[in-house]
Amino acid sequence: MPKLAVFPKAYMDDLCVHGTMSLAEWIDLAAKLKVDGLEFYTGLLDLKDRSRWKEFRQRTEDQGMTIPMMCASPDFTHPDAEFRQQQIDQEKRDIEMTAELGGSYCRVLSGQRRPEVSRADGIRYAAESIEACLPFAAERGVTLIIENHYKDNYWTYPEFAQHMDVFCDLVAAVEAPNFGVNYDPSNTILAGEDPLELLDRVKHRVVTMHASDRYLKEGTIEDLRKEEDSMGYAKRLSHGEIGKGMNDYDAIFSTLAGVGFDSWISIEDGVDGFDQLERSVAFLRRKMAEHWPA
């Protein structure tokens, strides 16, 4: 059966901007959920001090959890080669952090969808940058996972490979034993596309998953597809309790179980309170037991 982790989606500004919550406080709070692990984000303020990485790993393990996944946001689609090299160097530091924290998976992205970068150039920039990181990651036992992403919290533009056709072309362009997909069904909805169609196309490359759910606040899914400005998608959709939104978790888990997926599922939820996160954990535990029976 896959293992369940949680990401501090509801506390990002507290942990990354204002510093009103410490990482130790988040670890202790998350332990109440009785999950298997915690997904960290590279922008957590307390992780800036490398000397404390061992402390946070120990605190997490003392609470009966591990830190399997690192959420990094490299921006590989900048037209300037020097900028891309800086992003590669930063990703390597994030890979080191992943390994020192005991993790096996570190996220990569394509980068921002800058208007001046063509489709072909963006895919090439991202693929070459990811490939530059892969040997470094392999030496440290880390698999790089590319997410079908919407937009990093602190970016200007949405993800270059937000849409399914670009994402699948980028995934196909990189072949390595320690490279795979972090599948996020909600981000496909944000793109106005079908999460199950994307999953069917990349199911054999999925090595981790983000679990969340989305609700339409206004309009229909067809309205999403008509909007050309994807930065507006989030205004129509909001995060919500997992299992009560637009994602079909029976279909998702059935597909993943069918291809032998047995890795980490990380929850991005809790924006409406910790009790919501607790209900989402319970829902996913129940569904995982149904689709991966002991």
Image (cartoon, grey):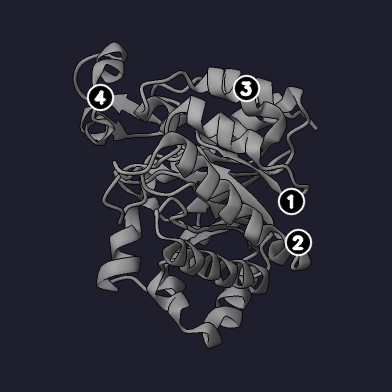
Q: Amino acid at mark 1?
A: Asn
Cα separation between marks 3 and 1 = 19 Å
Query: Which sits earlier in the primary sequence, circle 1 or circle 4?
Result: 1
Q: Position of residue 168 (x, y in %)?
A: 57, 30
Q: Which mark is residue 228?
A: 4
Q: Amino acid at mark 4?
A: Glu
> Nearer the observer, disc 4 or disc 3?
4
Image point (51%, 49%), residue name: 125
Q: Which mark is residue 201?
A: 3
Secondary element at tag 3: helix
Could you tell me how far apart the alpha carbons at marks 1 and 2 are, in whole angstroms? 6 Å
Residue at coordinates 38% horizontally, 39% vertically from top-left?
150
- The residue to which callout 2 is attached is 138
Amino acid on which disc 3 is placed? Arg
In the picture as drawn, the residue positioned furthest to the bottom comes out as: 51
Q: How many marks?
A: 4
Say which residue label 1 marks. Answer: 178
Which of label 1 and label 4 is nearer to you?
4
* Mark closer to the chain start, 2 or 3: 2
Counting residues from the start of the chain, the first of labels 3 and 1 encountered is: 1
Which quadrant: the C terminus? top right
Which residue is at 70% across, 60% downward? 142
Residue 215 visible from this viewpoint: yes
Q: Which is nearer the eye, 121 or 293?
A: 121
For marks 1 and 2, the one nearer the N-term is: 2
Q: Residues within 10 Å of mark 1 (few under 14, many from 20)?
A: some
